[in-house]
């Protein structure tokens, strides 16, 4: 009887110890700088296959900022989608004039906002600049990469063989197509004959449209 | 005795992370006050009084989502873009038809008043910077629809 009681007591102590260890680990992951490396290690262990790898060459067509790179400087862009622990994730690596500007070959730094089409990444956006992280926008349809960082450096890069390589003046970062010019001539006359405005199928600024439902839990 | 010990262990394992998440507000976040109102031929008549918010950091933008906890169709996205300035993407409450909803992207060009303030606090939770701020707008669209109101939000993460 006494041995049985002692055995139960030991077991309980062991289990409490394990529970405390789990709690400490949860605290480290949630609230300390160790969380990043721990999650990165887990992510690298469980990282899966590369689903798509797109490589482009391009050139800087516009620069601003103190640490200027020259217009015409050659750039290389790699856009990769991998089947990772938390689902499909996208990474962009940008190098211009031999300088690594964006993207690192480690488990961190994945881009959260991206659009896939026909198994390829057509758009990727990182505009969070907290703690000096640089921002980047890759747009395959426009054949363009936009980059900016805390030093004030801003670049526009046109990609070879894609789109026009130029950002339209009214390009919208919300993923909404640019505003169409006001109708003129016959188009304007046709518009005048419409008795009531219709909900647009194309989302442009200032126009009520049918957009993709915002699925975000609050 | 063993059964009591195992039950205690399982309860403790479940409770520790849950208590931590609860303490930092892992389920929903922030406080929102104020109201947006709209009326017109396309948006109908609506009022939206968000009671929850979340940071856009995990979605890669500088800004917040605001909305009503109990209504998944009542959502708006308030953000600042370094190149394009302040913008609001408003999903019209009650307008959703399956995966599609009536939405409108508001920029200063379309508004008599569109003021967005988003402040990064010194607090981070789960590596997400907590945001405070406010939104004030008065917009008249070419379709004749009008949308206006003011919102304040705090502790969004």
Image: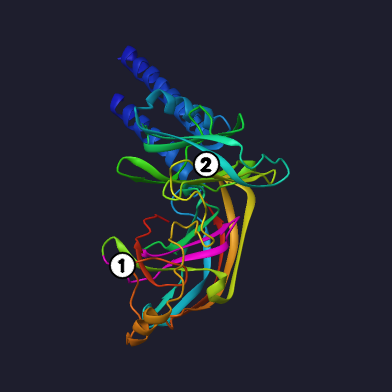
Task: Give the numbered dot on residue B96.
Answer: 1
Q: CA distance from mark 1 to mark 2?
A: 32 Å
**Quarter in which the C terminus of chain A is drawn:** bottom left
Residue B28 in picture, x, y percent from top left: 45, 54
Residues in magenta? Answer: B72-97
Q: Earlier in the sequence, mark 1 or mark 2?
A: 1
In the rendering, at what x and y percent does residue B141 appear? 47, 78
Question: Which disc is residue B126 wearing?
Answer: 2
Whole-percent x, y for residue A92 in the image: 48, 37
Q: Residue at x 38, y 42 (%)?
A: A121
Residue at 27% across / 67% down in the picture? B97
Question: In front: B156, or A106?
Answer: A106
Q: Chain of mark 1?
A: B
Q: Which of labels 1 and 2 is toward the front? A: 1
- Label 2 is found on which chain of the structure? B
**Image quarter (top left, top right, bottom left or bottom right) of the N terminus of chain A:** top left
Residue lying at the far left in this picture: please name it: B98
- Residue at (34% x, 74% y) in the render: A199
Main secondary structure found in the magenta portion: strand
Q: Nearer the viewer, residue A131 or B18?
A: A131
Number of other residues with Cα within 10 Å of mark 1, as a class: few under 14, some 14 to 19, many 20 or more: some
Q: What's the coloring here?
A: rainbow
Q: What crowding class fits label 2: few (fewer than 14 Cα within 10 Å), some (14-19), or many (20 or more)? A: some
Same-chain status of marks 1 and 2: yes
């Amino acid at each position: 009887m006494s041995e049985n009681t002692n055995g139960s007591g030991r077991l309980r102590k062991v289990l409490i110890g394990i529970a405390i260890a789990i709690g400490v680990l949860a605290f480290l992951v949630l609230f300390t700088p160790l969380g990043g490396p721990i999650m990165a290690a887990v992510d690298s262990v469980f990282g899966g296959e590369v689903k798509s790898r797109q490589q482009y060459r391009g050139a800087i067509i516009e620069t601003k900022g103190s640490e200027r790179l020259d217009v015409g400087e050659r750039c290389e862009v790699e856009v990769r989608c991998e089947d990772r622990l938390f689902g499909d994730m996208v990474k962009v690596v940008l190098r211009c004039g031999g300088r690594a500007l964006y993207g690192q070959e480690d488990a961190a730094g994945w881009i959260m906002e991206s659009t896939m089409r026909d198994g390829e990444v057509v758009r990727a956006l990182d505009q969070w600049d907290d703690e000096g992280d640089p921002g980047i926008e890759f747009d395959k349809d426009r054949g363009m990469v936009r980059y900016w960082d805390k030093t004030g450096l801003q670049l526009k890069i046109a990609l070879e063989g894609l789109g026009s390589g130029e950002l339209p003046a009214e390009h919208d970062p919300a993923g909404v197509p640019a505003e169409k010019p006001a109708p003129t001539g016959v188009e304007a006359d046709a518009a005048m004959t419409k008795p009531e405005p219709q909900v647009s199928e194309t989302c442009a600024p200032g126009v009520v449209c049918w957009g993709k439902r915002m699925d975000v839990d609050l | 005795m063993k059964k009591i010990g195992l039950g205690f262990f399982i309860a403790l394992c479940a409770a520790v992370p849950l208590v931590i998440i609860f303490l930092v507000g892992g389920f929903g976040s922030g406080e929102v006050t104020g109201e947006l109102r709209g009326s017109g031929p396309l948006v109908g008549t609506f009022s939206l009084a968000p009671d929850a918010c979340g940071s856009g950091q995990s979605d890669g933008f500088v800004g917040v989502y605001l909305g009503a906890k109990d209504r998944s169709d009542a959502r708006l996205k308030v953000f600042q873009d370094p190149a394009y300035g302040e913008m609001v993407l408003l999903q019209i409450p009650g307008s959703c038809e399956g995966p599609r909803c009536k939405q409108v992207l508001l920029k200063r060009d379309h508004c008599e008043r569109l003021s967005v303030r988003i402040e990064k606090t010194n607090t981070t939770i789960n590596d997400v910077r907590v945001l405070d701020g406010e939104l004030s707008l008065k917009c008249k669209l070419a379709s004749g629809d009008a949308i206006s109101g003011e919102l304040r939000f705090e502790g969004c993460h």
